[in-house]
Image (cartoon, helix red, strand yellow):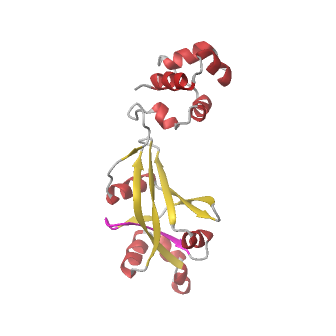
Amino acid sequence: MTTGEKLALLREKKGITQEKLSEILNVSRQSVSRWETDISFPETDKLIKLSKLFECSTDFLLNEDIQGNEESSIDVSIDNCYKFIRECGYFFLATSFNNQPKLRPFGMIYSNKKALYFATDKRKNVYSDLVGNPQIEMASYNVNTRKWIRVNGKAEVENSIMIRDEMINKYPLLKQKFFDETEMFLVIFRLLIHEISIY
């Protein structure tokens, strides 16, 4: 399904005419018609407004591979999940504290093909958030493939010295940051995955 076809379908589902949509977006009705017939594409700011109006992602509107149900849960191996996030170079970790969501960028993730691991500092708020409520979600976006990955599950403290050493070897920055007497502040969490979605 093309971007134009999706726009027309979503507009009709909302019961909005081309004229009304043009008023909402402050464009001509002809612009809306050209978008829906794939003659032209909405500008970035219009695309963002369309995604909010139609309650969908901009990826869904632009990517012809994503059909009606934009989010597809698929059976993805831990190793593939790890490779996806590593290729992105970062991930966002969502925690909860006092029923309030908190979102933080992270860069260091590790996998031994059995589980995903990430490290933090016991002196940081994210550590106390995870101890108080271990239910988390992580997400990452690949700018090359224009795909998101979302992983939700439960974070548990990993006490294995072997995993700690493997992660420190993978990320020498951890060794620099947690050297000698500060090493006691390094904590590694293992993610017990409940669901992985790529869309």
Residue 47 drawn above or below residue 133: above
Residue 122 locus on image (x, y percent): 57, 76
Residue 146 drawn above or below residue 129: above
Res 185 → quadrant: bottom right
Residue 15 locus on image (x, y percent): 57, 22
Q: Main secondary structure of the magenta part?
A: strand
Q: Which residues are magenta?
A: 112-121
Q: Residue at x 39, y 53 (%)?
A: 84
Question: Left or right: 193 with respect to 133?
Answer: left
Residue 116 locus on image (x, y percent): 39, 65
* Quarter of the picture holding the N terminus: top left
Residue farthest along the top direction in this orientation: 30
Residue 82 belongs to magenta span: no
* Quarter of the picture holding the C terminus: top left
Q: Nearer the viewer, residue 125 or 55?
A: 55
Q: Residue at x 43, y 74 (%)?
A: 168
Residue 115 belongs to magenta span: yes
Res 166 → quadrant: bottom left
Q: Nearer the viewer, residue 177 or 33?
A: 33
Q: Residue at x 41, y 41 (%)?
A: 145
Residue 107 drawn above or below residue 32: below
Question: Left or right: 21 with respect to 85?
Answer: right
Q: Nearer the viewer, residue 42 or 24?
A: 24
Number of callouts in the render? Answer: 0
